[in-house]
Amino acid sequence: MTEALEFLVRHGAAVLFAAVFIEQIGVPLPAAPWLLAAGALAGAGKLNWFTGLSAAVFGSVLADLIWFYLGRYGGHRMLRLLCRISLEPDSCVRRTQGLFVRYGMRGIVVAKFIPGLSTLVPPLAGSSGLSAPRFLFFDGLGSVLYTGCFVVLGVVFSHQLEQIIEAGTSISSDTGS
C-alpha cells in the first residue's frame, strides 16, 4: 500500500474533510481522487465509509457557508472578486446569475458537480437574500450527492483502483523512484 493510502487509512476523516474543504473554498486542488481512494478503502474494509462521507460533507458545507456569509455581507463585490480571478471574468458573473435564476435551488445542488461554479454559487445565494436554513438544506443535499457519488464509485471500482495503484507502485519501484 502506498504511503498516501496508509495516511488516508490512519487519518481518513481529517484528510477527507481537508481535501473537500480546500476544494470548495476555491483552491484548485481536486478532492475527487481522495474521495475515490476513500471509497476503495471502504470497499476493502479498511476505512469506515460513514465517517469518511460525514467528514467530507461537513468540509463542503462549512466552506460553502463561509462563502454564503461573505456573499451576504459583501454583496456582489464578493462575486465580482471571485470572477476577476477566474479564466473568463467578463461572462462569469452573468453566467452564474443566469444559472441561479434559471435553476433556482436545483442550481445549488448541480453547481457542486461543476468546477468553479461550486465556489461561485454560495456567495451569489448569500447576496440574493436566500435564507441560511434553505441554503443549508440544498447545499447539504448537493454535498451529500457530490461526495457520495465519488465514494460509491470508489467502492464499486475498488478492485480496479487497487490494480492501478499496484501497477503504479511497481512502475515507480522499477524506475528507482
Image (cartoon, helix red, strand yellow):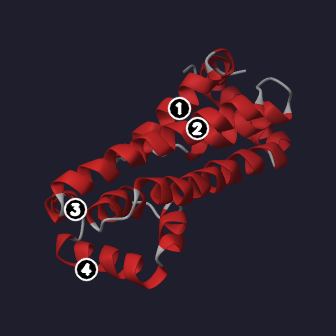
Mark closest to the chain's N terminus, 1 or 2: 1
Which residue sits at x=57%, y=46%? 32
Q: Disc 2 designates what residue? A: 56
State the separation of the CA atoms marked 3 and 1. 25 Å
Q: Report which residue position mark 1 lands on.
A: 17
Which residue is depicted at the point 54% across and 37% down?
Answer: 58
Q: Quadrant of the C terminus?
A: top right
Q: Compute the Cα span from label 4 to label 2.
A: 30 Å
- Callout 2: SS: helix
Residue bearing the label numbered 4: 94
Q: Are marks 1 and 2 in contact (CB under 8 Å)?
A: yes
Q: Amino acid at mark 3?
A: Leu
Is residue 26 left or right of 109 when viewed as pictured? left
Q: Earlier in the sequence, mark 3 or mark 1?
A: 1
Secondary structure beneath label 4? helix
Tag 2: amino acid: Ala
